[in-house]
Amino acid sequence: MNYYQNIKDILVKNEIYKQVKDYSKNKHDLESYYEVGKLLIEAQGGEERAKYGNQLIKEYSERLTKELGKGFSTRNLRNMRQFYLKFQKWQALPAILSWSHITELLPLKDIQAINYYIYVAEKQNLSYRELRERIKAKEYERIGYKEELKEPKINTLIKNPVIIKTKNIPDKLTEYALHQLILEDMDNFLKELGIGFAYIGHEVKIKIDNEFQYIDFLLFNTKYNCYVVLEIKIEKMKSTYIGQVLNYMKYIDKHIKESFHQETIGVILCKKENKFVLEYCTDYKIFTTTFQLTNNS
């Protein structure tokens, strides 16, 4: 078999396809580069030999660049080879993603991490630059979900820690100051918190036992169709916080939640996670996580 000619034919057809059928070029790109990766491995004598042999790729790169132009560097061909190696067991290629998305995923060794980033990139329509930032921030390592990704539970997509980016980190952090930092960039905070969170209100006034109380943040999760009570604590986790949040959740379920909504959940964002309280918290609808301030300048 003339592997070089087959690879060249695939790439030429792909370039033509992209010009004629732009609406589906991502899918065709991935199918073409996947096939090229497969042929490269065969030309190098199989997967084991392909891991170490780059001379053939260098030769093909020089010939393709001379005959077809830019876009066929040794690095790009190695990426195509790696693409096939990592995705050959997938039932279907992630067609919504572009080749630029895929190249951000290739350095990852954990298949479940790749699964997770494909999931969030497709669900949240992330650009490849946004995906790069998620990977750089180690988002997968900060979630609880470590099994095969299908339809993760809401608690497993709440990150730990939640990274709050700000240009000005106050010398003395108070709960009020932390609230203001979150409010200044609520959109990014909600994305950082997890998937499907929407802002309802801040310092939401409610009345419990003839006494007015205030919920730090009331959110709604569109994916799980439920209200979310979010309490912010700059101190370590305390068992009293759980009772407080439970009362707020019960109030929302009784006075605000509609019959077609799922039961309200609670999230406590605190300075440092207290494992004892976490492990022995009896209410499965309350989740705790920590926060981390980073400079966004």
Image: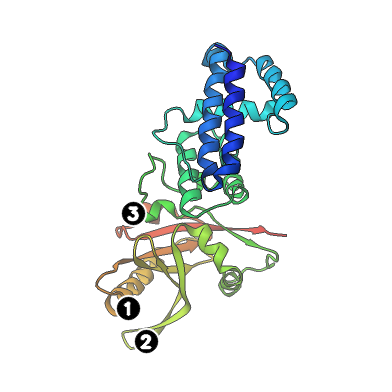
Q: Nearer the viewer, residue 164 or 219?
A: 219
Mark 3 belongs to which amino acid? Tyr
Instruction: Please say which color scheme the image uses.
Output: rainbow
Q: Earlier in the sequence, mark 3 or mark 1?
A: 1
Crowd tier of the residue under label 3, counting other residues whose Cα lies within 10 Å: few below 14, some 14–19, many 20 or above: few
Q: Position of residue 187 (x, y in %)?
A: 55, 66
* Rendered location of residue 263, percent (x, y): 29, 66
Screen quadrant of the C terminus: bottom right
Query: Label 1 belongs to which residue?
Result: 256
Kindly give the residue lying farthest to the left in the view shown. 259
Q: Earlier in the sequence, mark 3 or mark 2?
A: 2
Q: Residue at x 39, y 64 (%)?
A: 222
Between the residue at mark 2 and the residue at mark 1, the CA separation in whole angstroms equals 18 Å
Tag 2's secondary structure? strand
In the rendered view of the protein, which quadrant contains the N terminus?
top right
Q: Is residue 163 above or below residue 140?
A: below
> What residue occupies the far bottom of the structure in this picture?
210
- In this figure, which residue is indicated by the disc labeled 3? 280
Mark 3 or mark 1, which is nearer to you? 1
Sequence-wise, the earlier of marks 2 and 1 is: 2
- Element carrying mark 1: loop
Are discs 2 and 1 less than 8 Å apart at CB?
A: no
**Label 2 neighbourhood size at 10 Å, few (<14), some (14-19), many (20+)?**
few
Mark 3 to mark 1 CA distance (whole Å): 29 Å
What amino acid does circle 1 point to? Ile
Please tell me the numbered disc located at residue 211: 2
Q: Residue at x 56, y 25 (%)?
A: 36
Q: How many marks?
A: 3
